[in-house]
Image: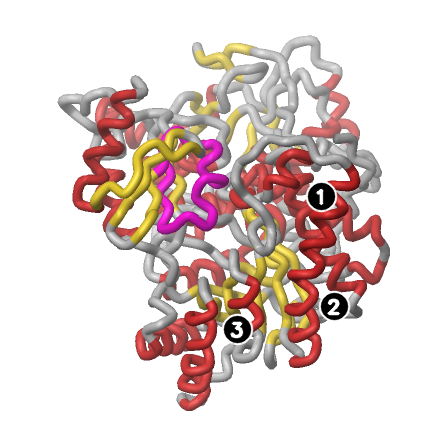
């Protein structure tokens, strides 16, 4: 569908999107408030003591807003006891009820919490993966039915001063939206806007939006479309945004994927509250989210305009890789339609050259000093002209030590340099010489900067300079390319974080599945604790492992369930059988690199 929106954020100057303040209990979200940190407990909502313990643990860790699932009215009613006990401990952290399929649960939950999260795709809407044509009249009739179901909740929230998150998930768009807009970011935005229009008609404005997806590219485009749609509606549509990459996974991969999606938006000035969703204990999400918000704020130059150009360096609403021309560097093809290449310094190459055979997929491909790469300041007209006037192709990058943010600088470089020249992007313009630097900090900055540019379509090669250790810098380069979808070299996992809906131990099960399938290069496997987002978020996955009932697993091919109610103790073996049935299985090599 043709977009009439214009992205309001300036690609060459950081400016935080100005929003109204929405109060979640005593915590202000948006306006001049800092980026608020959220997480979600994993305990069964019917277990009051365990839920309270997790809420208090999260609050002690610095979590500012805590979400609790309320999948039925009975679960929602127990929020009264959880809230009362949390307050009795002197903890005033706002509580959020997470609602999906049950409007009656939402109405009950709104009595006891400071905020209610609803998902437009499955709140009073149909999702049967049916293909049908909706006439305009049928579409309006569906909207009227949604209005009837949603209005009572809006009225209760308005009367009690309860905030709301209208949270669209890419994995749970309704059949009505899917049939009219497709499984697209545009459909995600329209799904949320329908609910927002109902709220506004009832003069209710205490809500925030979210546009979550497991694919960072989809998530980034969805938020950009949302911001543009809100801008087009008028100044009073300035609602805050909650950011998150859903089903990001665990370990380095989960952190990298979250940093790409959340970090790229924060550095564009978008986002007022964030959650880093990891398939780990919830309390471990909080320091990662706090670090990411802090590091992204450090990366931008708040008062610096590096270009007065009004042209966009890329299409913010549709992914398209910048087209350069193919050239050969050190026997490696770079640019054009070639995969994004990994560079390293000569010093780092020398440090690992004796063990390249042990490094598996994490190979250095081009040595920086011998590559013929030219580093420039894209603000300097003479330097830009010197590149553009060359008859031969040359790889181009930003000079180190420039006083500009990495993302804005490379955007300007890509827009000013003749597109035939390949661009090599860096994680930082300040190469690290500090062996004591925390790797997680390097990881988050590198993923946010490089991942953001890759999702913009910019970059023919990557160079990680912020990590001094040679092997780790190479591993980080490849993992960022994998998470951004630029270069698939290992098994890809989509794994949701635990919550009270989860029907099995996600951490333990994910580890088992990784151990059994981690050698399947290019195969994408989704591990989902329940059915809420499962089929939709698995749209890009080859196979899915989803909790269907307590201790029972359903297996999927794409988003189609093909095996039902498999006992959990058999499910990993049955998943392997399913992969074999579809010709995606290979035996584990005799020697698998320790690097993997």
- Observer-nearest residue: 203 or 107? 107
Dot 2 lies on which element?
Answer: loop
Say if residue 463 shows up in the picture: no
Number of residues whose C-alpha sits closer than 10 Å to that of mark 2, classed few (under 14), some (14–19) or many (20 or more): many
Residue 225, disc:
1
Residue 196 location in percent, x, y?
72, 58
Task: Please check the rendered image and state whether residue 463 is part of the magenta-colored stretch, yes or no.
Answer: no
Residue 521 location in percent, x, y?
33, 25
Dot 1 lies on which element?
Answer: helix
The answer to whether residue 577 is above or below residue 252 is above
Q: Residue at x 64, y 26 (%)?
A: 320
Residue 109, disc:
3
Q: Is residue 412 left or right of residue 524?
A: right
Query: Residues under labels 3 and 2: Cα distance?
Result: 19 Å
Task: Please check the rendered image and state whether residue 532 is part of the magenta-colored stretch, yes or no.
Answer: yes
Q: Are marks 1 and 3 in contact (CB under 8 Å)?
A: no
* Residue at the disc numbered 2: 205
Task: Give the mark nearer the N terminus: 1 vs 3.
Answer: 3
Provide the residue span drawn in magenta. Answer: 525-544
Residue 190, disc:
none
């Amino acid at each position: 569908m043709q977009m009439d929106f214009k992205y309001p954020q300036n690609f060459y100057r950081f400016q935080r999107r100005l929003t109204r303040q929405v109060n979640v209990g005593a915590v202000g979200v948006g306006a001049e408030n800092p980026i608020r940190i959220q997480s979600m407990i994993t305990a069964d909502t019917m277990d009051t003591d365990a839920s309270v313990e997790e809420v208090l643990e999260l609050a002690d860790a610095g979590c500012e807003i805590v979400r609790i699932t309320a999948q039925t009215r009975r679960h929602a009613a127990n929020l009264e006891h959880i809230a009362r006990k949390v307050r009795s401990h002197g903890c005033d952290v706002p509580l959020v009820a997470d609602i999906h399929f049950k409007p009656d649960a939402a109405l009950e939950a709104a009595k006891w919490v400071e905020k209610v999260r609803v998902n437009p795709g499955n709140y009073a809407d149909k999702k049967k993966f049916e293909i049908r044509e909706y006439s305009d009249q049928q579409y309006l009739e569906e909207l009227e039915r949604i209005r009837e179901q949603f209005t009572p909740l809006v009225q209760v929230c308005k009367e009690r001063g309860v905030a709301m998150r209208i949270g669209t998930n890419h994995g749970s768009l309704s059949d009505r939206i899917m049939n009219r807009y497709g499984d697209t970011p545009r459909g995600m935005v329209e799904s949320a806007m329908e609910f927002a229009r109902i709220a506004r008609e009832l003069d209710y404005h205490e809500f925030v939006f979210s546009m979550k997806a497991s694919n960072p590219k989809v998530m980034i485009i969805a938020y950009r479309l949302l911001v543009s749609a809100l801008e087009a509606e008028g100044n009073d549509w300035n609602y805050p945004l909650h950011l998150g990459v859903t089903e990001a996974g665990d370990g380095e991969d989960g952190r990298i994927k979250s940093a790409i999606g959340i970090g790229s938006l924060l550095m564009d000035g978008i986002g007022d509250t964030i959650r880093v969703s990891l398939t780990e204990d919830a309390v471990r999400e909080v320091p990662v989210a706090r670090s990411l918000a802090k590091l992204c704020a450090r990366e931008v130059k708040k008062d610096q305009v590096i270009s007065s150009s009004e042209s966009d360096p890329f299409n913010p609403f549709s992914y398209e890789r910048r087209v350069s021309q193919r050239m050969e560097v050190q026997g490696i093809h770079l640019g054009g339609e070639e995969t994004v290449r990994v560079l390293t310094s000569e010093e780092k190459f020398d440090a690992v050259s004796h063990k390249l055979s042990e490094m598996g997929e994490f190979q250095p491909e081009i040595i920086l000093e011998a590559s013929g790469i030219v580093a420039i300041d894209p603000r300097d007209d003479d330097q830009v002209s010197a590149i553009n006037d060359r008859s031969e192709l040359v790889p181009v990058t930003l000079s180190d030590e420039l006083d500009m943010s990495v993302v804005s600088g490379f955007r300007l470089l890509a827009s000013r340099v003749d597109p035939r020249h390949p661009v090599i992007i860096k994680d930082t313009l300040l190469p690290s010489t500090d062996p004591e630097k925390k790797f997680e900090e390097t990881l988050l900055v590198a993923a946010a900067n490089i991942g953001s540019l890759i999702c913009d379509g910019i970059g023919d090669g990557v160079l990680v300079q912020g990590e001094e250790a040679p092997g780790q810098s190479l591993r980080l380069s490849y993992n960022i390319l994998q998470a951004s979808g630029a270069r698939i070299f290992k098994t890809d996992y989509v794994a949701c974080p635990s919550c009270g809906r989860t029907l099995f131990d996600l951490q333990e099960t994910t580890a088992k599945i990784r151990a059994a399938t981690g050698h399947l290069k290019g195969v994408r496997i989704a591990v989902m604790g329940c059915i809420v987002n499962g089929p939709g978020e698995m749209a890009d996955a080859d196979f899915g492992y989803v909790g269907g009932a307590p201790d029972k697993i359903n297996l999927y091919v794409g988003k189609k369930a093909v095996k039902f109610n498999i006992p959990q103790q058999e499910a990993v073996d049955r998943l392997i059988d399913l992969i074999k049935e579809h010709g995606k299985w290979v035996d584990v090599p005799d020697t698998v690199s320790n690097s993997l």
